[in-house]
Amino acid sequence: MAELRWLDQVFAARRGEPVVAVLAGEPEVGKSALAVYWAHRAAPHYPGGLLFADLGGPSAPGAPAEVLGGFLRTLGEPAADVPAGGPARSARFAELSRTRRMLVVVDGVAESDDVRPLLPAGHGCAALVTSRSPLTRLVAQEAAAWLAVGPQAEQDALDLLAVAIGPGRVLAEPEMARCLVLLCGGSPPALLRAAARLAGQADRPIAGLVAQFAAAAAR
């Protein structure tokens, strides 16, 4: 799909320097699902680790300092050695990230200042951010790439399905693949959940899942 290709191009073109990309759009258009899916696919390029923080969920941390504490512990810092204050944690995180090639995904960002302390400093590092707003200040100050994410066109949704379950299965049942996209409303999160069911059962036809969804919708 177009968004995945855009992410591949942005991070490949600037690999070897700190890279920040922002996915912005209205709620439920699939920003988070796309970010997480791409991050796991790209993880082999970042052997220093994959870090994830959700700043917009119901159990989201209250401040960047709390997120940084979790990052530091994940990177191997003993709890007793994690600095107490936000600036000290930010400095320690920057120090550690300079020696690693890592990818940081920060979901549900409201303000540019919330995410800036969480950006890794190493030249081989990258950060992928999602937000309802374009975070223009972050984009300007960090030279970040930016993409507006909207509802998926049918072909983009089919491309996403093909990436998730393999193009051969989509080509084998093209009409059923279109029906599945229609039943999922073109929503990437819904489509990826459906694809996960198919990916876990390589011999299950798309038609069977479409029939199951259609029966549930009829009820």
Image: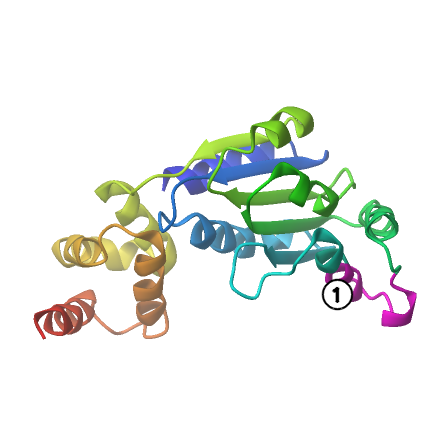
Q: Which residue is painted at 79% across and 66% down in the image?
A: 73
Residue 71 is one of the magenta-drawn residues = yes
199 is higher (above) or lower (below) than 164: below
Q: Which residues are magenta?
A: 69-82
Helix, strand or loop: magenta stretch: helix
- Few, some or many C-alpha atoms within 10 Å of disc 1 (few <14, some 14-19, many ≥20)? some
- Quadrant placement of the N terminus: top left
Q: Residue at x 65, y 50 (%)?
A: 104
Write down the residue under mark 1. Answer: 74
Residue sitting nearer the eye, 108 or 13: 108
Residue 86, percent across and down?
81, 51
Is residue 107 magenta-colored?
no
* Residue in view at x 28 percent, y 47 percent: 157
Dot 1 falls on a residue whose secondary structure is helix
Where does the C terminus fall, quadrant-wise? bottom left
189 in relation to 23, above or below = below
Query: In the shown orientation, is residue 35 left or right of residue 11?
Result: left
**Closer-to-camera residue (157/30):** 30
Q: Nearer the viewer, residue 120 or 55?
A: 55
Give the residue type at disc 1: Thr
Q: Determine the residue positioned at 78% across, 41% down.
A: 121
> Residue 207 appears at what percent x and percent y?
15, 67
Q: How is the image coloured?
A: rainbow
Identify whether 206 is placed above or below 99: below
